[in-house]
Image: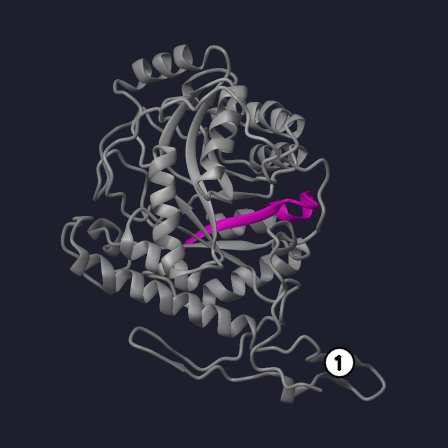
């Protein structure tokens, strides 16, 4: 599930001043992919391809377009229940996209079709064993040559718990901190288990020496012996240490408890400010918790000279104004570039853009926005690394269990 928003429905943020700041630093850009786009009616307008939503070819095209634009990474949405206009449970609507692929499996299918862009699937931890998630993400890192990430997600919805039958949840209230905090504490343990499992093979554990018949050095595989409130995991992993050592962990956060989770468990946090002033406040709060986590802002974007008219048309099709936990931007790529640079001054280091409709708004990002930012000297002209950690400026960590040799 989406980590619980506590802010009112977003409107378009106030436009920044037209002038460009002098010599801003480079920005990181990612896109969040979800079906036909983040507007519920996006599937109903050309050039959407609803007949192809459940095909590998469709998703391969989207990720290839994102890589064409030299974006840092794509995220792929997932959940343990059908999409719904209701907060805690399925609805009866048949005029919105319902159904999705498993994000980790989809990312593994897309990895061989790409060369440089990061792939960050969502995987829920509340009803999922961390051992399974850890080996899935490690496998993705191997298949992609070091471009894997993960967005751990909590699930507090009663309807999703009923799919598994092992836990019973009351109806969800996102303002109930006593209910929410244990879910994030469990998520923190799940991430810690995964990180230990990723380190449970030393980098040189595989010998593969045919003459001696030794494929692996057993002394370089390690039990993790994790025993916590929610999990007890012996280890080691069944998957050798992957190219990045530690795949990139990301988290969506809207309020203090998820900020604490992201600061302690993630490499990148996605936040949802609605103005530069609010962005500065969120950055200050997170920096009190962590000086290391990369801070990205989420924005839902509909782009182009006709963006406002397109949004109105889609709103009419859906029967309601577009609503989001993130700020909603409608305007040109030049206006969006202005906003990104102004928010960067508040401490935002990168952006995860949610295209309102794909492929239209995705192409506006990859072909229009990136060119605009490149012209201002704040976006790359080529990929400078073949690993996601390298693109984000994160070092490759040494394994925690490895002995100095």
Colour mode of the rendering: one colour
Residue at position x 56%, y 36% in the image: 59
Classify 10 Å Cα crowding around label 1: few (below 14), some (14-19), many (20 and above). few
Q: Which residues, given as a range, are shown in magenta?
A: 110-124
Indicate the secondary structure of the residue bearing disc 1. strand
- The answer to whether residue 393 of the structure is visible from this angle is yes
**In the image, is residue 112 part of the stretch drawn in magenta?**
yes
Q: Position of residue 6 (x, y in %)?
A: 23, 43
Counting labels gives 1
Q: Position of residue 148 (x, y in %)?
A: 58, 54
Viewer-proximal residue, 146 or 101? 146
Q: Is residue 236 above or below residue 122?
A: below
* View extreme (front): residue: 22
Viewer-proximal residue, 51 or 396? 396
Viewer-proximal residue, 224 or 305? 305
- The answer to whether residue 154 of the structure is visible from this angle is no
Q: Is residue 19 above or below residue 249?
A: above
Q: Position of residue 364 (x, y in %)?
A: 56, 23
Specify whether 351 is left or right of 241.
left
Residue at position x 39%, y 48% in the image: 283
Specify whether 399 is left or right of 318.
right
Quarter of the C terminus within the rendering? bottom right
Q: Quadrant of residue 189?
A: bottom left
**In the image, is residue 69 part of the stretch drawn in magenta?**
no
Q: Quadrant of residue 123?
A: bottom left
Q: Is residue 99 above or below residue 264?
A: above
**Residue under pointer 1:** 207
């Amino acid at each position: 599930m989406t980590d619980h928003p506590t802010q009112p429905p977003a409107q378009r943020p106030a436009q920044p001043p037209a002038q460009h700041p002098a010599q801003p630093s480079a920005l990181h850009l990612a896109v969040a992919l979800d079906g036909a786009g983040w507007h519920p009616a996006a599937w109903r307008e050309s050039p959407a391809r609803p007949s192809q939503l459940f095909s590998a070819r469709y998703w391969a095209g989207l990720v290839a377009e994102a890589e064409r634009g030299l974006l840092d990474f794509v995220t792929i949405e997932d959940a343990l229940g059908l999409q719904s206009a209701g907060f805690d449970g399925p609805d009866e609507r048949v005029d919105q996209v319902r159904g999705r692929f498993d994000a980790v499996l989809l990312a593994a299918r897309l990895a061989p079709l790409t060369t440089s862009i990061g792939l960050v699937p969502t995987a829920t931890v509340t009803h999922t064993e961390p051992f399974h998630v850890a080996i899935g993400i490690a496998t993705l890192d191997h298949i992609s040559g070091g471009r894997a990430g993960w967005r751990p997600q909590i699930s507090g919805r009663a309807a999703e718990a009923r799919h598994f039958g092992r836990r019973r949840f009351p109806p969800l209230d996102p303002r109930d901190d006593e209910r929410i905090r244990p879910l994030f504490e469990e998520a923190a343990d799940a991430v810690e288990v995964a990180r230990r499992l990723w380190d449970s093979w030393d980098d040189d554990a595989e010998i593969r020496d045919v003459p001696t018949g030794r494929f692996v050095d057993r002394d370089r595989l390690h039990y993790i012996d994790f025993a916590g409130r929610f999990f007890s995991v012996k280890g080691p992993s069944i998957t050798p240490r992957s190219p990045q050592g530690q795949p990139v962990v990301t988290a969506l956060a809207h309020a203090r408890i998820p900020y604490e989770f992201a600061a302690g468990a993630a490499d990148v946090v996605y936040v949802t400010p609605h103005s530069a002033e609010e962005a500065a406040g969120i950055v200050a709060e997170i920096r009190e918790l962590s000086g290391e986590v990369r801070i990205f802002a989420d924005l839902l974007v509909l782009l182009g000279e006709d963006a406002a008219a397109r949004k109105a048309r889609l709103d009419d099709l859906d029967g309601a104004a577009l609503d989001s936990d993130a700020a909603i931007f409608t305007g040109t790529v030049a206006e969006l570039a202005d906003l990104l640079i102004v928010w960067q001054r508040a401490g935002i280091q990168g952006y995860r853009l949610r295209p309102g409709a794909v492929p239209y708004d995705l192409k506006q990002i990859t072909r229009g926005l990136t060119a605009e930012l490149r012209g201002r000297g704040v976006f790359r002209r080529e990929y400078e690394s073949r690993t996601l950690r390298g693109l984000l400026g994160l070092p490759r960590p040494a394994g925690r269990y490895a002995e100095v040799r």
